Amino acid sequence: MLPVTPEVSVILPVRDGQRWLREAVDSVLTQTLTALELLVIDDGSTDATPQILKQCRAADPRLIVLRQQRDGLVAALNRGLAEARAPLIARLDADDIALPARMARQRDYLHAHPDVVLLGGWAEIIDEHGAPRGKQMRPSPERLRDTLARKSPFIHPTVMFRAEAARRVGGYRAAFEAGEDYDFWLRLADIGEIAILPELLIRYREHGGSVTRTRELRQIYSARLAKLASAARRAGRPDPSAALTAPPDWQDADPGAFERDSSRLFRMLELADPARARAAPASAIDLEAITSQRSTLTAGERKFAQAAALNLLRERGDLDAMPRARLLGVLLSLGPLKAAKLMLRKS
């Protein structure tokens, strides 16, 4: 029977996830903690996903299916937040598997630590066939806030958080496309403690649906904005990202003050695409956008900056000696050893 008030609501967004969906759903509905509900938000699937969900729902009324018309991941997550009835909310993706005691272990931890609003965990990595490929046991629970200030320490489908805290900070924000989870963690950390349960909680599937270069760049851009907004809040200033309602376009000729420097940087980083490097007008080659922010570059941003500088050196025979010398200087300043490897690889 469906519990009057579940202890945990599990949010699982899906679009065209027929291949592994049933396995993901079964892993939730067979948890040792039975007082739960599973909210599956179907984001306009056109494959067999609706039929699979109908069959699963007929077998277990704890599964609740919510449908929307390809409104996207953030809308799906926020729909789940709005509909969840439990005081604790867990995440899972449609290609992952929750280990049997996962929900009970996280519930117990949060009951024992009422100051913690966000709890992550570890994951076993599996391939598309379910074969083990290693483990993600990161990061150390110590100095977790220091890690969060630099990058996301949480594996999104392992997290459990308090519903009241999630709603208080406003849920996920569409402006941080591809980095909406990191922005969410930073805002939860503003109002409570965060923790990592050092136990394997899920089997996390890595498969052929790899992240494209464009999406990876958007993810890195969103993470940079999320960190800048978080730093402002920690300093007691208003959230400079509060007015953003959609992902900023770094090609915007007149960006807002908050994203201006980041947009300038990312117009250069997108030249990591050789076609863009070839097509960019000489006036758009703004090396100062990289050098002025070199000390703040993350590993991902540095990788794109190196590729952009190398592409300009290799693809732009129209550049004079002075710009080429400056490009080489930028490439070397971003990491001499890495620069040498890149140049050898592309020679």
Image (cartoon, rainbow, N blue to C red):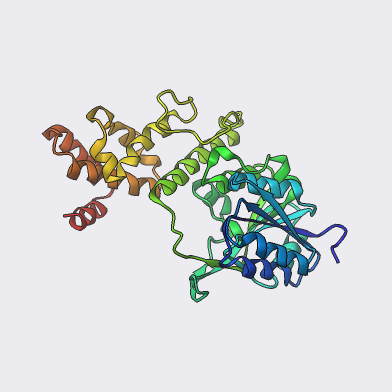
Q: Hey, which quadrant is residue 55 in on the image?
A: bottom right
Q: Residue at x 49, y 28 (%)?
A: 258
Q: Residue at x 57, y 50 (%)?
A: 145
In the rendered image of this protein, does residue 133 appear above or below residue 106? Answer: below
Q: Is residue 295 visible?
A: yes
Q: Is residue 189 visible?
A: no
Give left or right: position of 41 versus 164. left
Question: If the image is split into quadrants, where does the N terminus sit?
Answer: bottom right
Q: Hey, which quadrant is residue 263 in on the image?
A: top left
Q: Is 314 or 151 nearer to us in this picture?
A: 314
Q: Which residue, as the protein is rendered here, is positioned at the far top?
A: 254
Q: Residue at x 35, y 35 (%)?
A: 267
Q: Is 142 or 189 nearer to us in this picture?
A: 189
Q: Is 206 or 14 nearer to us in this picture?
A: 14
Question: If the image is split into quadrants, where does the C terminus sit?
Answer: bottom left
x and y percent of residue 334 in the render?
Answer: 29, 46
x and y percent of residue 135 in the render?
Answer: 51, 70
Q: Which residue, as the protein is rendered here, is positioned at the far bottom?
A: 131
Q: Is 187 or 124 nearer to us in this picture?
A: 124
Q: Hey, which quadrant is residue 301 in on the image?
A: top left
x and y percent of residue 268 in the render?
Answer: 32, 37
Give left or right: position of 140 versus 281. right
Q: Which residue, as the protein is rendered here, is positioned at the far right?
A: 4
In the rendered image of this protein, does residue 264 appear above or below residue 17? Answer: above
